[in-house]
Image (cartoon, helix red, strand yellow):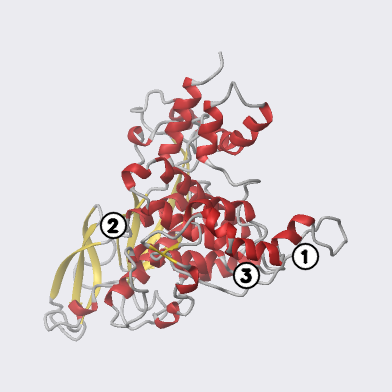
């Protein structure tokens, strides 16, 4: 416990990291004697945080480890229903930073830290409550009695010499309860980025989650009209797509010229010329549109979708995830992070197709509309993904997915995926069912990408895909 019970005193929260011994790690990997005590090899200092009070809180889900047949440390081989880390919240640190600690601000602030070194977000009690007659003039000085995601916040009136205190029991959460698809998408991004141990990779998904909650709260409390298009069914998903579009369509620091069919030649390949031709544009609007299908009753045409690019300008503060991505871009290239995010959302889209009967088509429509829009912006470099989503959406879009139309030059376009070809879970299932009747080349084409994922790590949020792959692989395995 930091500080005094009555007066907030400057203090230091010193964070350490426990390095487990190799003996403890091997026991954990082999799943033997899990009740044995954990052996600590060494303790290393991580960071000092200036604050007046601190408490542990559980407000963010633990990143889901990827699925893998290896089942080694950093992966899991069991299904969602048997995994201990599903629906488990990480223990983070909530601190009260005083005026001196936060750079001379007006009032102390509540700050959430992950592992002591990653500043996730700042919290504040509702303005309506703090401006009421009961709490007017009070500010936070301490934290007590934390249990799960709830904590007692101690308030003191600034100009009261008697130091009269008030206690407010508060819930601290960054879980998007309002939208299951948005929460699962965030879990998929965290599984792709937050499980490799790199601090930069772990920071970005936390900032995306915090930005989503913060922007969603501002939109709910805003009296501005026209911020969200009419007919939006899922405001939380709309908010998340605004953030992801701004992040994934962020320009690169420097890029080489787009590769062509011949090195040193400025000529486009025959395929690229076809994609940029008038014939392709006419086909997409004519016979191609009929081929891909008509718009559904709950969809809208892209031309009638409101552009959300200027929406963020009407709200306070810049997106912390976008600011972090800009810093990464100045140091090198943020493309690797973009690929991880896009691929995780695509794999979640494929996973949702397997359970469309129970979830309905809302998940695939929302995810597909976002991914199709990103693929179209990077065309022709992502024509395989564009074709993949077009087969299910046609010329329609989900109205709950935000729309942005930034001007991206040909030199700034890049492939947002690390896959050589768009993975399709239905193609994998079909190939496995015809394993004895199709040529080896077709079999390899239909199963290659998912076979690599199963070996090196399938996104931890795609439990249905993992169970399907394990089941069919076992049933149809050749003796």
Q: Residue at x 63, y 56 (%)?
A: 382
Q: Quadrant of the C terminus?
A: top right
**In front of the other: 192 or 107:** 192
Crowd class of label 2 (few under 14; some 14 to 19; many from 20; radius 10 Å): few
Crowd class of label 1 (few under 14; some 14 to 19; many from 20; radius 10 Å): few
Sooner in the amino-acid sequence: mark 1 or mark 2: 2
Of helix, strand and loop, which one carries label 1?
A: loop
Q: Residue at x 42, y 64 (%)?
A: 401
Q: Give the x, y percent position of residue 137.
A: 19, 84
Q: Give the x, y percent position of residue 398.
A: 42, 62
Sooner in the amino-acid sequence: mark 2 or mark 3: 2
**In front of the other: 369 or 38:** 369
Q: Residue at x 27, y 66 (%)?
A: 3
Tags 2 and 3 touching, CB below 8 Å = no
Q: Which residue is disc 3 drawn over?
A: 251
Of helix, strand and loop, which one carries label 3?
A: loop
Q: Quadrant of the N terminus?
A: bottom left
Q: Which residue is disc 2 drawn over?
A: 177
């Amino acid at each position: 416990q930091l500080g005094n019970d009555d007066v907030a005193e400057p203090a230091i929260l010193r964070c350490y990291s426990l390095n487990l011994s190799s003996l403890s790690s091997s026991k954990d990997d082999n799943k033997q004697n899990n009740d044995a005590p954990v052996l600590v090899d060494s303790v290393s200092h991580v960071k000092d945080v200036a604050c007046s009070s601190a408490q542990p809180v559980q407000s963010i889900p633990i990143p889901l480890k990827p699925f893998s047949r290896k089942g080694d440390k950093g992966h899991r081989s069991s299904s969602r229903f048997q995994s201990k880390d599903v629906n488990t919240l990480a223990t983070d640190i909530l601190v009260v930073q005083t005026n001196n600690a936060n750079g001379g601000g007006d009032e102390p602030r509540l700050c959430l830290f992950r592992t002591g070194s990653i500043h996730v977000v700042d919290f504040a009690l509702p303005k309506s409550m703090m401006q009421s007659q009961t709490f007017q003039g009070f500010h936070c000085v301490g934290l007590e009695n934390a249990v799960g995601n709830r904590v007692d916040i101690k308030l003191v009136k600034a100009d009261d010499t008697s130091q009269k205190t008030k206690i407010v029991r508060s819930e601290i959460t960054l879980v998007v309860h309002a939208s299951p698809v948005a929460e699962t998408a965030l879990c998929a991004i965290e599984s792709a980025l937050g499980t490799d141990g790199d601090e930069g990779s772990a920071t970005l998904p936390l900032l995306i989650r915090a930005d989503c909650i913060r922007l969603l709260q501002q939109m709910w409390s805003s009296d501005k009209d026209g911020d969200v298009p009419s007919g939006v069914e899922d405001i939380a998903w709309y908010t998340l797509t605004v953030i992801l579009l701004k992040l994934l369509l962020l320009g690169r620091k420097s890029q080489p010229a787009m590769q062509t069919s011949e090195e040193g030649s400025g000529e486009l390949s025959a395929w690229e010329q076809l994609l940029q031709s008038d014939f392709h544009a006419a086909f997409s609007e004519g016979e191609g549109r009929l081929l891909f299908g008509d718009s559904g009753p709950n969809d809208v045409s892209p031309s009638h979708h409101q552009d959300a690019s200027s929406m963020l300008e009407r709200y306070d503060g810049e997106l912390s995830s976008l600011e972090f991505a800009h810093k990464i871009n100045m140091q090198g290239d943020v493309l690797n992070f973009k690929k991880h995010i896009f691929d995780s959302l695509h794999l979640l889209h494929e996973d949702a197709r397997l359970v469309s009967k129970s979830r309905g088509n809302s998940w695939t429509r929302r995810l597909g509309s976002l991914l199709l829009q990103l693929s179209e912006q990077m065309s022709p470099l992502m024509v395989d993904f564009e074709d993949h989503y077009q087969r299910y959406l046609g010329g329609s879009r989900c109205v709950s997915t935000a729309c942005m139309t930034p001007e991206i030059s040909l030199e700034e376009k890049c492939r947002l995926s690390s896959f050589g070809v768009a993975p399709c879970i239905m193609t994998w299932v079909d190939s496995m069912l015809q394993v004895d009747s199709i040529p080896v080349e077709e079999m390899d084409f239909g199963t290659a990408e998912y076979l690599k994922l199963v070996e090196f790590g399938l996104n931890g949020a795609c439990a249905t895909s993992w169970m399907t792959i394990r089941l069919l692989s076992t049933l149809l395995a050749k003796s």
